């Protein structure tokens, strides 16, 4: 049982028959390159994404990976206000980008930040630090809807409201990285929607294609499209669009956002009762289980003895659980039982 899905990539389950059929039927187009067919698929995708996410007045730029989506968002922001300075948060992860990597306790993915860097890292949820740094020279603030690699840390509502207000007052662009936390995983289409704020740019990838490489930037109407702002060779190709449309159809038709909220709440509640757990953090099906010990041996037992695959995070004690959005209560119970047995037999 895969409860990790390649870092939240598997949103609708492995080999969902509707998804397989949608991509297979598009394969007949292979080798025939027609912009008009591609563009009609891109429009269908943009419309469906706008409708399901509640952002139908946003434009959609399609690309191929999360890093590419974030780079394009940063570029759009600097074109928009002509500034350079970026604010990001400690323990955040925004892909192998030029700027936005700050996993301070995982040196393997630390950014090559040098003295010329225009990036400032602040503690998450520290409003005083934010007020001190978010001034009129800031180009953009980039923040994850929920920090994934950093160990499932959730920005508070109050922090997100202050952030939105300060960005508006200073003219800084607010970029919500929903690459891991988006696409229904949190029980909302985008995790930040729980706080009722609107981002200027939203980046998406991972669960968008359920394994097929596709990503995008949702762009608020305050950005005026201009020739030369954005471009891509492969972004929004036939198969990527077919995969992304299939994912949205399944999320909508199978009510998967509601399922993520229901099963997610159930898991968080039940997991919190288990022994040897310091804290369970999360929202919907983005869950971090902080143990009293390193999670590696626990993950190993879950895999070897119970055939359940889970993930870790940059905080070595935090087990990360990112199941497909169509996980059932019975499957959730199998995991709760397996983790309970494992923690009892492997006390910290
Ligand atoms: C929040 C977040 N942003 C960006 C990325 C980078 O995405 P990609 O690996 O597709 O470039 C990731 C990948 O883990 C991520 O979790």
Image: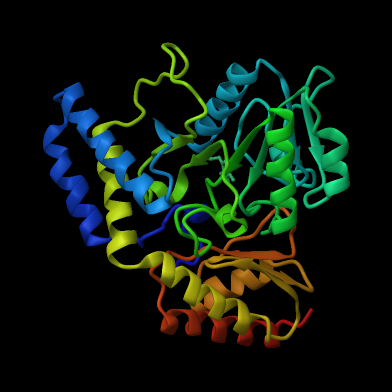
Q: Is residue 331 left or right of residue 29?
A: right
Quadrant of the displayed image that contains ligand 1: top right
Residue 244 seen in the current view: yes
Please state, as top left, top right, bottom left or bottom right, where the C terminus lies in the image.
Answer: bottom right
Q: Position of residue 42 (x, y in %)?
A: 28, 34
Q: Give the answer, above or below, for where 338 lies relative to 51.
A: below
Residue at screen point 36% across, 60% down: 12
Residue at screen point 73% across, 33% down: 169
Dividing the picture into quarters, in which one does residue 63 lie? top left
Q: Nearer the viewer, residue 315 or 262?
A: 262
Q: Nearer the viewer, residue 259 or 212?
A: 259
Please state, as top left, top right, bottom left or bottom right, where the N terminus lies in the image.
Answer: bottom left
Residue at screen point 49% across, 71% down: 261
Q: Is residue 38 left or right of residue 32?
A: right
Q: Give the answer, above or below, for where 129 lies relative to 113.
A: below
Q: Give the answer, above or below, for where 237 lies relative to 259.
A: above
Q: Nearer the viewer, residue 70 or 85?
A: 85
Q: Position of residue 57 (x, y in %)?
A: 41, 38
């Amino acid at each position: 049982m895969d409860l990790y899905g390649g870092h939240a990539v598997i949103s609708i389950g492995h080999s969902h028959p509707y998804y397989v059929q949608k991509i297979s039927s598009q394969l007949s187009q292979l080798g025939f390159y027609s912009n008009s067919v591609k563009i009609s698929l891109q429009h269908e995708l943009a419309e469906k994404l706008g409708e399901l996410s509640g952002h139908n007045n946003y434009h959609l730029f399609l690309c191929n990976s999360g890093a590419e989506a974030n780079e394009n968002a940063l570029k759009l922001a600097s074109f928009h206000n002509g500034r350079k300075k970026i604010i990001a948060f400690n323990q955040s992860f925004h892909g192998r980008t030029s700027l936005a990597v700050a996993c301070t306790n995982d040196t393997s993915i630390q950014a090559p930040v040098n003295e010329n860097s225009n990036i400032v890292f602040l503690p998450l949820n520290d409003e005083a630090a934010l007020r001190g740094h978010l001034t009129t020279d800031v180009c953009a603030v980039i923040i994850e809807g929920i920090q994934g690699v950093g160990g499932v840390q959730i920005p508070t509502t109050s922090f997100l409201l202050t952030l939105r207000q300060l960005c508006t007052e200073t003219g800084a662009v607010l970029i919500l990285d929903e690459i891991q936390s988006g696409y229904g995983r949190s029980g909302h289409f985008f995790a930040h929607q729980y706080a009722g704020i609107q981002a200027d740019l939203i980046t998406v990838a991972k669960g968008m294609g359920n394994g097929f490489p596709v990503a995008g930037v949702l762009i608020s109407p305050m950005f005026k499209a201009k020739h030369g702002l954005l471009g891509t060779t492969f972004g929004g190709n036939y198969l990527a669009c077919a995969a992304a449309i299939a994912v949205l159809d399944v999320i909508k038709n199978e009510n998967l956002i509601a399922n993520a909220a229901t099963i997610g709440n159930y898991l968080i509640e039940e997991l919190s009762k288990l022994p040897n757990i310091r804290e369970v953090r999360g929202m919907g099906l983005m869950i971090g289980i902080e143990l009293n010990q390193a999670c590696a041996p626990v993950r190993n037992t879950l895999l070897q003895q119970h055939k359940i695959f889970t993930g870790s995070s940059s905080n070595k004690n935090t087990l990360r659980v990112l199941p497909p959005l169509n996980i059932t209560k019975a499957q959730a119970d199998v995991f709760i039982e397996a983790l309970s047995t494992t923690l009892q037999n492997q006390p910290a």
